Amino acid sequence: MRADICAVACADLFRGDGEILASPMGTMPTLGARLARLTFAPDLLISDGEALLFADTPALGTPGQVEGWLPYRAVFDVLAWGRRHVVMGANQLDRFGNQNISCIGDHAQPQRQLLGVRGAPGNTVNHRTSYWVPKHSPRVFVDQVDMVSGVGYDKAAGPFHDLHRIVTDLAVLDFDTPTRAMRLVSVHPGVTVAEVEAATGFALSVEDAVETRTPTPEELTLLHTLDPNNLREREVPSREPAVRAATHR
């Protein structure tokens, strides 16, 4: 199931992070962070997304065992020290990882008003940041974002700027190139490199792309436990190729 592969790819975002605060935004990144904690990242700190730290690793939508309080002011301390890995969404991303969640069109007279910059500037200059994009399309992966909310690699962002990876419903991407432009790391099983290129509004480095790993039997069991209502399938539904192709336009 494609959704299982995406969940595991989101879990792998946290591989090697150690004892830091995971701040996944949305269903799939949250599921990935909890899967990571139950497998290869036991020191990962997870929360209810507001102010409570969990001692255990609850299923989605169920209360966890609380072991600490992390009020909003304390989050800024964590952010300033860089002990946080946030996984955000994006309405637009360009080749250097500039993110837009603010508006579509000219800022002075936008065609569509979105969230605003929210915490994106601080997130992208002070600690590791990844992105989750549930529908990989040229509308999201654009040549130039309409407004910079989260800072990309072509901006002077300072020593703590660390854009890690992007997971989509088609692929995994990163910025490990000489120019820090986006490259294709892997395509999910059943997806071709050409499909990803067609769904991206700029040229990608694709030479070293491999196939995204599939979940282990243990991970599949944990995913069913962590997500008993199969919310991940609603986010990345299993689709016929013709339907999937339609979403790329």
Image: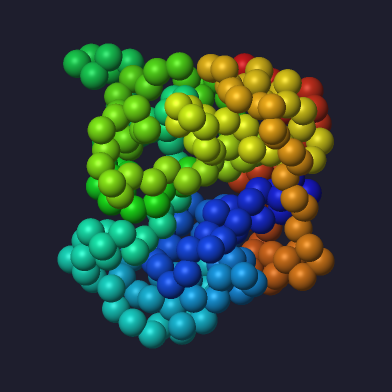
Quarter containing the C terminus: top right
Residue 183 or 177: which is nearer the viewer?
A: 177
Residue 194 vertical placement versus 162 (above, below): above
Rendering coords of residue 82 (x, y %)? 31, 59
Residue 75 visible in image: no
Specify the quadrant of the image occupied by residue 103.
top left
Could you tell me how many numbered marks the image carries?
Answer: 0
Rendering coords of residue 58 (x, y %)? 55, 75
Specify the quadrant of the image occupied by residue 70.
bottom left
Q: Residue at x 28, y 46 (%)?
A: 159
Q: Residue at x 64, y 64 (%)?
A: 227
Specify the quadrant of the image occupied by residue 242.
top right
Residue 225 visible in image: yes
Residue 196 vertical placement versus 19 (above, below): above
Q: Residue at x 43, y 72 (%)?
A: 19
Q: Residue at x 42, y 43 (%)?
A: 163
Rendering coords of residue 45 (x, y %)? 43, 72
**In this rendering, position of residue 160 left or right of residue 11:** left
